[in-house]
Each structure stands twice: as C-alpha cells, then as structure tokens.
Image (tube, rainbow, N blue to C red):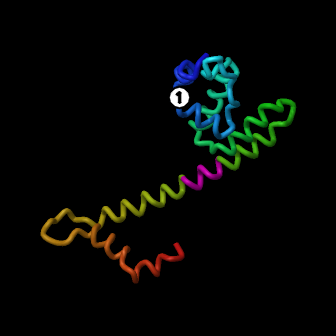
C-alpha cells in the first residue's frame, strides 16, 4: 500500500508517518519503480502500535524501547513493567503539578471582586510577580 492508504488505515497524517520514519520508529519502506513508498501489513501494525503508545503520552525514546522489547517476545515482562512504572510516576508528577497550578489559579481568581472601579487584583498580582525585585525572589523556583 502507498503512504496515503497507510495514513488512512492508521487514521493519521502522511507527515506523521514520515516523521516516524525519520525517527527510526518505522523502517524505511521498499520503493516502487516510480519511487513511491510501498508499505506492507506489518508497517500498519507497527504504526498502530506507535500511535497507541503516543495516545498514552509515551515518549518516543520509550516507544523505541517498547518496540525493541516486542521484537524479543521471549524476554520477561519485567522490562516493560519497569518502563511503564516510570511513565506512571511521570504522569503522577505532572498531575500533582497540574493540581498545584489549579490551586494557584483558583486562589488568584478569588482575588478579583469584579469591581471595575479599581485596579484589577489579578493584573496587579501579575505585575507584582513580574517586577525585578519579585523575580529575584522567584529565581530558585
């Protein structure tokens, strides 16, 4: 199948396929005499695997490692588990950071009383945080 057909079947963009080829996640396909790429069923299966991993926000280096693990099915699942455990820890860390951000934004929003007769407390807070003396106190953050 040609790249357009592969993209259609995998529900992705042609540029995505080319990107994964450049990244070495998809092998360079055989070429037709017309120089069109010619993909086979394994390419679609591999592309779907990569896309599923990406839907789980797994980074490309980890996908590369998972593909290597998949190529060695006789090895134990412990390596896959370790990689997934690392990813879970990273997701939990990002969730904590997002919860912290949510609390900060809610607290900031609570400072506004909606009264247009005086300076906006939210904008004043942003201005205070961006002042040089404030930047020095946030340098370690």
Residue extending farthest to the right is: 74
Q: Position of residue 94 (x, y in %)?
A: 55, 54
SS for dot 1: helix
Q: For the point 59% across and 55% down, which residue is it?
A: 93
Q: Position of residue 7 (x, y in %)?
A: 54, 24
- Give the main secondary structure of the magenta stretch: helix
In the rendered picture of this protein, how many numbered marks are placed on residues? 1
The answer to whether 96 is drawn above or below residue 59 in the figure is below
Q: Nearer the viewer, residue 61 or 108?
A: 61
Q: Which residues are magenta?
A: 88-94
Whether residue 107 is in magenta: the answer is no
Q: Position of residue 13 (x, y in %)?
A: 51, 29
Q: In the image, 66: left or right of 111?
A: right
Quarter the N terminus occupies: top right
Residue 2 falls in image quadrant: top right
Residue extending farthest to the left is: 117
User: Which residue has dot 1 on it?
Assistant: 14
Q: For the point 62% across and 27% down, which residue is it?
A: 48
Q: In the image, 116: left or right of 12?
A: left
Q: Position of residue 91 (x, y in %)?
A: 59, 49
The answer to whether 28 is drawn above or below residue 36 in the figure is below
Residue extending farthest to the bottom is: 133
Residue 45 falls in image quadrant: top right
Q: For the point 50% across and 77% down, which residue is it?
A: 139
Q: For the point 69% across and 22% down, which residue is it?
A: 30
Q: Nearer the viewer, residue 2 or 103?
A: 2
How packed mark 1 is, by other alpha carbons closer than 10 Å (few <14, some 14-19, many 20 or more), is some
């Amino acid at each position: 199948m040609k790249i357009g057909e592969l993209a259609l079947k995998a529900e992705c963009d042609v540029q995505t396929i080319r990107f994964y080829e450049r990244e070495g996640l998809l092998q360079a396909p055989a070429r037709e005499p017309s120089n069109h790429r010619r993909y086979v069923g394994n390419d679609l299966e591999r592309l779907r695997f990569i896309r599923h991993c990406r839907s789980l926000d797994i980074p490309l280096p980890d996908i590369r490692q998972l593909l290597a693990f998949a190529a060695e099915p006789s090895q134990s699942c412990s390596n896959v588990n370790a990689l997934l455990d690392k990813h879970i820890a990273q997701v939990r860390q990002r969730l904590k950071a997002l919860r912290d951000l949510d609390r900060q934004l809610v607290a900031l929003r609570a400072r506004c009383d909606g009264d247009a007769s005086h300076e906006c407390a939210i904008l004043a807070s942003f201005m205070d945080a961006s002042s040089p003396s404030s930047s020095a106190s946030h340098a370690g953050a």
